[in-house]
């Protein structure tokens, strides 16, 4: 039997997931603030291109941000599910080991 020890640092994984979650929230607010403040700045311009720039901002806001945030949310959800499964498995193995040593 191998003497190597497998250690799961679940608190570090939880900390990384919490950091990702707060980063997602922060990114959401930055993209919304940038979009809204840029649009407000454009209102004072008198140019034929302002409507096109406004449409471009909408496109960037709706496409790029949405896809990136969806991907980040998927990574967070997968990590959270992995963490829960690791906890469950660790507890089951611990219970089995304890019952075999008694």
Image (cartoon, grey):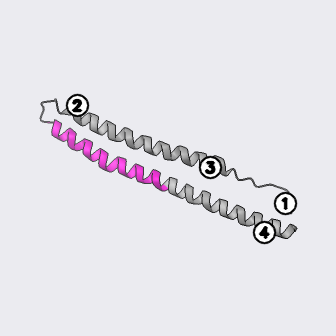
Tell me, for residue 96, which label it has, or none. 4
First along the sequence among labels 1 and 3: 1
Q: Front-most of 73 and 64?
A: 73
Give the residue at x 41% y 49%: 68
Looking at the rendering, the stretch of residues picked out in magenta corresponds to: 49-74
Pointer 4 with pointer 2, Cβ within 8 A? no
Task: Give the residue number, with chain letter if any, for mark 3.
Answer: 13
First along the sequence among labels 4 and 1: 1
- Say whether residue 40 is left or right of residue 18: left
Q: Quadrant of the C terminus?
A: bottom right
Question: Is residue 61 located in the magenta-colored stretch of the structure?
Answer: yes
First along the sequence among labels 2 and 1: 1
How much space separates mark 4 and mark 2, taking CA atoms? Answer: 64 Å
- Element under disc 4: helix
Q: How crowded is the residue under tag 3: few (<14 C-alpha within 10 Å), some, or many (20+)?
A: some
- Say whether residue 87 is left or right of residue 59: right
Which x, y percent locates residue 4?
82, 55
How much space separates mark 4 and mark 3, taking CA atoms? Answer: 24 Å
Pointer 4 with pointer 3, Cβ within 8 A? no
Task: Give the residue number, with chain letter if any, for mark 2.
Answer: 41
Q: Quadrant of the N terminus?
A: bottom right
Pointer 1 with pointer 3, Cβ within 8 A? no
Total tally of numbered discs in the picture: 4
Which x, y percent locates residue 63?
32, 50
Please identify the dominant SS of the magenta region.
helix
First along the sequence among labels 4 and 3: 3
Question: Is residue 5 located in the magenta-colored stretch of the structure?
Answer: no
Give the residue at x 13% y 32%: 47
The image quadrant of residue 48 is top left
Q: How crowded is the residue under tag 4: few (<14 C-alpha within 10 Å), some, or many (20+)?
A: few
First along the sequence among labels 3 and 2: 3
Task: Give the residue number, with chain letter if any, for mark 1.
Answer: 2
């Amino acid at each position: 039997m191998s003497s190597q020890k497998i250690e799961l640092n679940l608190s570090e994984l939880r900390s990384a997931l919490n950091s990702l979650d707060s980063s997602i929230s922060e990114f959401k607010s930055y993209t919304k603030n940038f979009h809204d403040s840029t649009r407000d700045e454009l209102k004072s311009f008198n140019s034929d291109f302002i409507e096109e720039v406004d449409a471009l901002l909408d496109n960037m806001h709706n496409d790029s941000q949405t896809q990136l945030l969806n991907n980040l949310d998927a990574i967070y959800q997968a990590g959270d599910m992995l963490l829960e499964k690791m906890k469950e498995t660790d507890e089951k193995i611990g219970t089995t080991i304890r019952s075999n040593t008694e």
